[in-house]
Amino acid sequence: MGRYTAAVCRLCRRSGEKLMLKGSRCLTPKCAMDRRSKPPGPQLRRPRRLSDRGLQLREKQKPRYAYGILERQFRRVFAQAEKQSGITGENLLVLLERRLDNVVYRLGFADSRPQARQLVRHGHIMLNGRKTDIPSCLVKEGDTISWKEASTKSEYYKQLVQSIESKSILSWLSLDKENLVGQVVSLPTPDDVGAKFEGKSIVEYYSR
């Protein structure tokens, strides 16, 4: 199955939680979750009760939707989390948070993760001074994220310089707002993940 291309607001309604798939729009009254919080599709008079497997599947899909990852890639990240020491569910969320496209989003360079992914894929972002167009690349402590010199002349960059002052940055990142250069101060923790994902349920889903 290819990448999801339908209305992303349906994914939030299906998950029953805001996944911030449209950036700042999700914080306005136009958000689909505020206007129609019920799941998409025909509404049954008596809603079906989800089984334990169904609840685990829903929890697994939440980070997949939020980070825009296909199932095969998500399984690879989960396998990598299993090999690390510690709690697998927490390791999984930390690995997802360390993705380059997510860091670009967290630094405020983009309003949403899909937009951040597009910036990376189009070669606008530099990682440690080198152009990197792989959104799934994992950042490390001490890495710097900046803009390609040619991209600083674009209209989008000029608008970003004006709007970046109003954006807040997470504690594990730092940002030079004058030059728009970000740095990974430390590795993220599960508490730094904005949405509430139950790592335990994800582990139980893949353990069956």
Image (cartoon, rainbow, N blue to C red):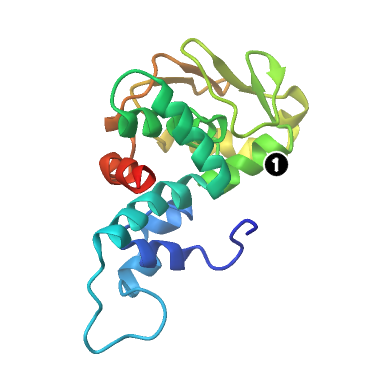
| Residue beneath the point at 69% across and 25% down | 132
Helix, strand, or loop for circle 1? Answer: helix
Give whichever of 196, 85 is nearer the camera: 85
Q: Residue furthest top?
A: 142
- Residue that label 1 marks: 155
Residue 169: image location, x then y, percent:
39, 29
Q: Where is residue 97? Give x, y as percent.
A: 43, 32
> Quadrant location of residue 155?
top right
Check the image and report above or below for 122 versus 8: above
Q: Does 180 sit left or right of 62 as displayed?
A: right
Horizontal side of 109 relative to 58 (left or right) equals right
Q: Residue at x 47, y 32 (%)?
A: 79
Q: Nearer the viewer, residue 125 or 166?
A: 125
Q: Tell me which residue sits at (63%, 13%) in the image.
A: 128
Looking at the image, residue 148 lies above or below residue 89: above
In this rendering, is residue 155 above or below 168? below
